[in-house]
Image: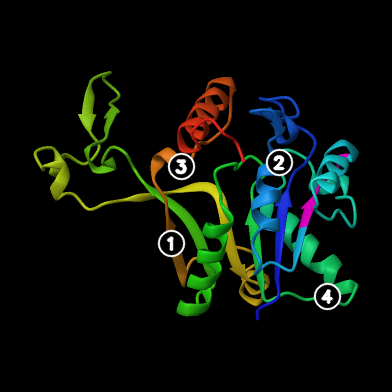
Amino acid sequence: MANVIAVIPARGGSTRIPKKNIRLFLGKPIITYAISAALNCDEISVVMVSTDSEEIAEIARNAGAAVPFMRDANLADNYTNVNSVILDVIRRYEENGRQFDYIVCLYPTAPFVTSEQIKEAIRLMEKNNADEAKMLAAFSFPPQRGMIIGPDGFTVYKYPEYASTRSQDLETIYHDVGQLYVYRTDAFIRFNGNITEKVVPILVDENEVQDIDNEADWIAAEQKYRLLHSGNPS
């Protein structure tokens, strides 16, 4: 059985939504949904939270996650990317003699992700000998039919060759939903986290995801969650 670590990156600072990673989402700190999904996945050996905040660390530990060390301040500003955080986690574990075959990166503001989806992602990785699994959803409107505003202020089709093409005849294009990623550890280290090949998709419906950047997004996420779970948050 593969050795798998789940890394939930959750820094303390948040400018658009204060304390976003631990704000109550339908009565529970939002990060606890991700922790619970990871803990309920038998394939995962370690569930850890990388944070610079003692408040987040305490909530994470109470929810069952490990916080074996605090994140350095230079990895907790607005410009730090998640790849750097994950590499730091892997390095620290290796210094203590622990290595992992796969890394599950689960965002703290992703209450929709389930343990079953994580299991499926790991299964797809092993089946396809992939370097990464990424959660994707189809665009609700075909990007090929998108419009831009020209320098004269008038609207034009970005891709005029598709202006008269029926939507059902256009190729389906997907977008990264920013919730769940699974990496083969050796590939992640080799490419410094920037894996572009051998990536398998985990397809989800738009109703199962919500980017949370402002108050309106937060309200929309809670509404979607209620609909998916019949008003009974788990």
Q: Dot 1: what SS? A: strand
Label 3 belongs to which residue?
208
Q: CA distance from mark 4 to mark 1?
A: 28 Å
Label 4 belongs to which residue?
98
CB-based contact (under 8 Å), mark 3 and mark 2: no
Q: CA distance from mark 3 to mark 1?
A: 15 Å
- The earlier-in-sequence mark between 2 and 1 is 2
Q: Quadrant of residue 201?
A: bottom left
Label 2 belongs to which residue?
31
Residue in the picture at 71% in, 51% down: 8
How many residues crowd mark 4 within 10 Å: few (<14), some (14–19), many (20+)? few
- Relative height, residue 7 to residue 112 (above, below): below
| Residue placed most toward the observer, 231 or 199 | 231
Label 1 belongs to which residue?
201
Residue in the picture at 72% in, 59% down: 86
Rendered image: mark on residue 41: none
Q: Dot 4: what SS? A: loop
Q: CA distance from mark 3 to mark 4?
A: 34 Å
Amino acid type, label 2:
Ile
- The earlier-in-sequence mark between 3 and 4 is 4
